[in-house]
Image (spheres, rainbow, N blue to C red):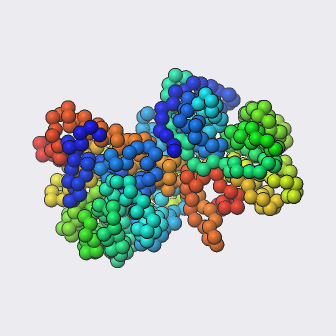
Amino acid sequence: MPVLIKAPVLLNEQVGPGIFLMKVHAPAVTAECKPGQFVHVRTTSERDPLLRRPFSIYRKEKDAGNLQLLYEIRGKGTSLMAGIRAGENLDLMGPLGRGWNLDRKPGTVIVIGGGMGTASLLALVEEFCSRKGFKIRAFLGFREKKLVIGAEIFARAGAEVTIATDDGSCGYRGPITDLLPRSVRGTGPFYIYACGPQAMLRRVAEFCELEGIVGEVSLDHRMACGTGACLGCSCRVKKKDSWTYSRTCVEGPVFTTSEVLWDG
Amino acid sequence: MANCSRLGVMLAGIKLKNPVIAASGTYGFGEEYAPFLDLKCLGAITLKGVTLAPRKGNKPPRIVETPAGLLNSIGLENPGVEEVTRAILPRAAKLNVPLIVNIAGETVEEYAEVAARLEGKFGVAALEVNISCPNVEKGCLSFGSDPKAASEVILAVKENTSFPVITKLSPNAGNIVSVAMSVAEAGTDAISLINTVKGMSINVRKRCPELGNITGGLSGPAIKPIAVCMTWEVAREVKNVPLIGMGGIMCAEDALEFILAGASAVEVGTGNFVNPRVTLEIIEGLENYCMEQGVKNITELVGAAWKEG
Ligand SMILES: Cc1cc2nc3c(=O)[nH]c(=O)nc-3n(C[C@H](O)[C@H](O)[C@H](O)COP(=O)(O)OP(=O)(O)OC[C@H]3O[C@@H](n4cnc5c(N)ncnc54)[C@H](O)[C@@H]3O)c2cc1C
Ligand SMILES: Cc1cc2nc3c(=O)[nH]c(=O)nc-3n(C[C@H](O)[C@H](O)[C@H](O)COP(=O)(O)O)c2cc1C
Ligand code: FES
C-alpha cells in the first residue's frame, strides 16, 4: 500500500549540470517499493506550482530505509526541489504505479536508458545483479558527455555498460538504439527494459517487433493525482481488435512494447 | 473525528457526518484514495461522472497546470452506467460513506435513462446531475447554460428517481442565477456549484494548444473567488434550496468562505491531488473553528456573511 509521508531529507546535492541526487529516509516506502515504481512529490507548500511531480525510485537502501531520487531541473517544481536542504522534509506519496516485470527465468537483461530515463533502471539492474544466472547489459544514451550520469554506478552494480551521446562527446555518436544487438532470438531468454524520451521508446518498440520479442517501456506522462482518480494521465493501449485509454499512474508507467500505441 | 455533532448537517434529506464532500471526477470511484485516509470520515463521496454508454474520453494531453490552477479536458471518460451499477457501485458501497452518483448525458432522455438505471441501487445517497461539463461536445453544458433546457433535464431525472437530486451548475452559463432559479422551480433538492471554468493554455515553444482537446476546464485555487461570488449570488436569490459550494477549496478557511456565502456543504476536488488528506484537515479545521467561535452547529454559519451584512 502506498503511503503519504513527510520524509526527512538526508542529502540533496548536485551531481551534474542541473542534475541532483536526493536521499530521503522513507522506510515505509522502501519496504514496499519495486523497481520502476515512482513517488509523487509536493515541491512546495505554496500553491504554485500546485500539483505534485512524479519521480522514479532511483535506488533503495532497504536496510537503512533510504530512498534515492535522481532528477533534472526542468521548470518551477524541480527548481524548488533543488533548493530543499538536508534536515528539511519532503512531502511524498508512494510507491505508486506498476513497476518492471521481475518474474523472469535466468537470461540476458538489456536495459536502455535515455537521459533521466536512466533513473528508473538502476534499481532494476541492481535487482537482477543480485540474482544468479543473469547477464546484464546497459545501453545508456545522453545529449552530451557532461550529462552522462550514473554510468559507473550501473557498471559497479554489475552491468556491462555501453554509452552513446547525441554529439559524440562520449561513446558512440547517435541514438543509443543503433547499438542494440541484433538477431537475438534463439540465443536464450532475452529481456528488454527501456525508459527515456518517447522517440527512443518508439525505436525500442520497433526493435522488439523486428526481433519478435516483447519488451517493457516506462512512459512519462503529466500527472495530477498519481493514484488513478483523475484520468488525466491516460495513454493509448491496444485491447483486442481495438484500443483503450489506460492510466499511466496505475496500469503504468511500465507497459509492454506490444500494447502501447504510439501517437503522432 | 472527536466530536462530529457540531459538523453534522442535513442536506436534501441526506444526513451527513460533516459538510465535506469529495468532488466528482477528482476522486475516481472512491477506492483510489483509500490508502491515504479513512474514507468513512468524509461527509460523502461524489463519484466520477457516469453516462449511459461507456465513453473513452478526450485525446491526451488531458491536463496542464497553470498558476495555482489545473486545466483538464478529461471528457467524461467512464465505463458507462451498466458497468458502474454491476461492478463498481457494489464495491464503493462497502466504503461505508454516502455516495453521490454524478450523471451526465447528451440528451434529456439519456439523463433520464441513467437515473432510471441507478434507481434504488444500494449505497447511493443522491444523484448529482452534471449539466456543466465544458469538455464534451454535445449536451451537458448546453443544458447548463439555458434555464429552460436545464429545467427539462431536472424534471426528467426527478421523474425517474426517488433519490434526492442535486443539480451541478456551470460558471460558463450566461446567467447562473437564472439557471439556478429554473432548476429550483423544477424541483431540484440541492444545487452544487461551480464546475470548472472554460479555459485554455498555449505552448509557446511548440506553438500549439497544451491540451489535446484544445480547451479545458480550470479548477483549483485560481477559480475560488469566482466560485465564492457565484455561491453568494445564487444563495441570495434561491433561498429554499440548499447549496453545495466548490472551486479551489484547499483548507478550512476556504471552505468557510463558501459556507458564509451561503453553502450548506462543500465539495473538494483539485485539493485532493495536492494533498490526499486535505478533506480530513478541512474537517478538523471546521471543527476547531466552531469550537473557538462557540458555534454549536455549522448550519448556523450558512450565509452568515450576508445575513448580518
Ligand atoms: C513516472 C514518471 C517518473 C519520472 N521520473 C523522473 C526522474 O526520476 N527524474 C527526473 O528528472 N524526472 C522524472 N520524471 C519527469 C518529471 O516528473 C518532470 O520533469 C517534472 O514533473 C517537471 O516538473 P517542473 O515543475 O520542474 O517542470 P514544469 O514547469 O512542470 O515543466 C517544465 C517543462 O517540462 C515539461 N514537462 C513537465 N512534466 C513533464 C512530464 N511528466 N513529461 C514530459 N514533459 C514534462 C513541461 O511541458 C515543460 O515544458 C518522471 C515522470 C514520470 C511521469
Ligand atoms: C480532473 C477533473 C475531472 C472532473 N470531472 C468531473 C466530472 O466527471 N463531473 C463533474 O460534475 N465535475 C467534474 N469535475 C469538476 C469538479 O468536480 C469541480 O467542480 C471543479 O474541479 C472545481 O472544484 P476544485 O477547484 O475543488 O477542483 C472535474 C474536475 C477535475 C479537475
Ligand atoms: S494522474 Fe490521475 S489518474 Fe493518473
Residue A105 image position (x, y, % from top left): 77, 51
Residue A135 image position (x, y, % from top left): 82, 43
Looking at the image, the residue that sits furthest to the left is B308
Residue at the spot 64% in from the left edge and 65% down from the top edge: A238
Looking at the image, the residue that sits furthest to the top is A87
Residue at the spot 75% in from the left edge and 46% down from the top edge: A112
Left or right, B61 with reference to B269:
right
Looking at the image, the residue that sits furthest to the bottom is B109
Residue at the spot 59% in from the left edge and 36% down from the top edge: A30
* Quadrant (top left, top right, bottom left, bottom right) of the N terminus of chain B: top left
Taking the image as drawn, is residue B126 in sight?
yes
Left or right, A249 with reference to B88:
right
Taking the image as drawn, is residue A197 in sight?
no
Q: Quadrant of residue B251?
A: top left
* Quadrant (top left, top right, bottom left, bottom right) of the C terminus of chain B: top left
Query: As displayed, is residue A241 above or below residue A114?
Result: below
Residue B180 image position (x, y, % from top left): 23, 62
Residue B167 image position (x, y, % from top left): 28, 62
Left or right, B154 with reference to A132:
left
Count all numbered tags in the image, as a single digit: 0
Residue at the spot 34% in from the left edge and 54% down from the top edge: B96
**Looking at the image, which is closer to me, B154 or B165?**
B165
